Amino acid sequence: MSSAPHTRSRLRTVLATALTAAVVSVAASAAPASATGSVFTPVPPHNPYAGPDGTATMHGDTGSSDTTPLAGPGSGTLTSKRVALASACPTVLVGSDGYPVVLCTPIFGQVPTVHLLDPDDGSSIAELALTKGSLLGGVYAYIDQQDRLVVIDGSRSLLRVGHHQDADGDWNLTIDRSLSLTSVIPEDDAVTGLSPDWQGRVWFATGNGLVGTADDRTGTVRALRLPDGEKVANSISTAPQGTLVTTTQATYLLTATADGTPRISWRQEYDRGSARKPGQLSWGSGSTPTFFGPGDGTDYVAIVDNADSRVKLQVYETATGRRICSTPVLLSGGAGSENSPIGAGRSVFVASTYGYPYPAVPADAGDSVPASADFKGGLTRVDVRADGTGCDLVWDNTLRSAAVTKLSLADGKLHTVLRDPLIPGTSGTSLLDPYRYAEIDPDTGKVIRSFQVGVGSLYDSLQMAGTAAPGGVYYQGTVTGVLRITTT
């Protein structure tokens, strides 16, 4: 692709128009549906301080619905390209200009690095190394309303990273704004998750259970310590009602006082089990909490607990914290999940990660019990009853999703990468396992279409999130870079 500035400018305009059109199309539709008719609306409202819904956060939007208004690859012949970055790349985001921004952790050195990708072919056209911090500090970030990547680095600084084109047509990544959080975050702690609220403040949660707000327009930072012993191992979610944080023991809805000081609206404990399970990164729920619901898209909150024998989907009423249901899930597969549930309308989709062979876990994760297990897989759909009196299981299977699954409101399909066993019919894993991009019918749990993207550990998607981008492109992070999946 030409690097001439005027060519880039035209491309940015085309991509921005395509992305806006897709969002407007879904918003205008009364009932985006699956191929066989289920309605999966509404979804959480757009956050004015975040980028486009579907591509602004790892989980699509600040409500962590894991939905997207963009379609996956079209009806042609599926094809894929591996963008080799010698890094694990869990976060692929896209701003309103259509340029993918990727947050990666290099295999050597493990210094978090931001890449700007060429939307035409996925190649890296600019990169910026950040200060090294905790393992999860190189995972969670979001795109703001000005297409800047918002991240907290290892120096405990809130950064806004912009991408800019110079007079020669070359792209550069720069730190456009920075705010130190060292006044409230001690040196032995690190930020795990962050998300903007509806007032433009950035909420954050640390591994050791500190929750706070930061306003880099005024320099104001406020924080609240959650009960001793509670850790935060996943990201957080925001909606007009407040901020959701799930610790290793409980789920919270928090709001803020006028000066930004967090306060607890409600707290709900869950069954965390007797130990960390294989295929999870902490002893507790693996869920980034999900806002969903049939009213305004934020009526309910969903997480998956960590009960020993059978994990359950926990659904709470957002306004009060009242439990709507505690429904067993992943009945056919492995009883554990490290991934955020998909929430859309009255439906929730849960994927098993039990037994997934992570190459590393956080230093304070503790031993898993048992030490290892087969990766049996498992996907479950649960619907909240129309009258809100409980939940019902719709389907349950043993598909071995190896990525955070996304639901497209444009094409009505679930999108993920499956890790097939080297020996068909078995549930073990190996360094030679094949990986397959798959589209799944959300009404039945059946695979509609799939395509093998590669064989072996270079293609391990490691339960990282996929992202649908404009033009029918689907990006999937792997342990060595990014897969760019499209059609010809």
Image (cartoon, rainbow, N blue to C red):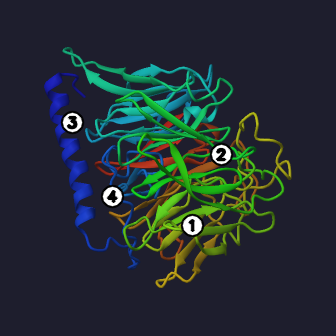
> Does dot 2 land on a helix, a strand or a loop?
loop
Upstream in sequence: badge 2 or badge 4: 4
- Classify 144 as above or below 39: above
* Residue receiving disc 1: 321
Upstream in sequence: badge 2 or badge 1: 2
> Does dot 4 land on a helix, a strand or a loop?
loop
Query: In this view, which residue lies farthest toward the right?
Result: 370
CA distance separating discs 2 and 1: 17 Å
Residue 202 in percent (x, y) is at: 44, 39
- Classify 193 as above or below 309: above
CA distance separating discs 3 and 1: 43 Å
> For the point 33% across and 54% down, which residue is it?
46
In this image, 307 relative to 72: left or right?
right
Type of amino acid at the residue the image marks with label 2:
Leu
Upstream in sequence: badge 3 or badge 1: 3
Type of amino acid at the residue the image marks with label 1:
Gly
Q: Residues within 10 Å of mark 4 (few under 14, many from 20)?
A: many
In this image, 212 relative to 227: left or right?
left
CA distance separating discs 3 and 4: 19 Å
CA distance separating discs 1 and 4: 29 Å
Upstream in sequence: badge 3 or badge 4: 3
Task: Tell which of 144 and 98 is nearer to you.
Answer: 144
> For the point 76% across and 41% down, which residue is it?
365
Mark 2 vs 1: CB contact within 8 A? no
In this image, 129 relative to 116: left or right?
right
* Residue receiving disc 4: 69
* Residue receiving disc 3: 12
* Residue receiving disc 2: 226
> Does dot 3 land on a helix, a strand or a loop?
helix
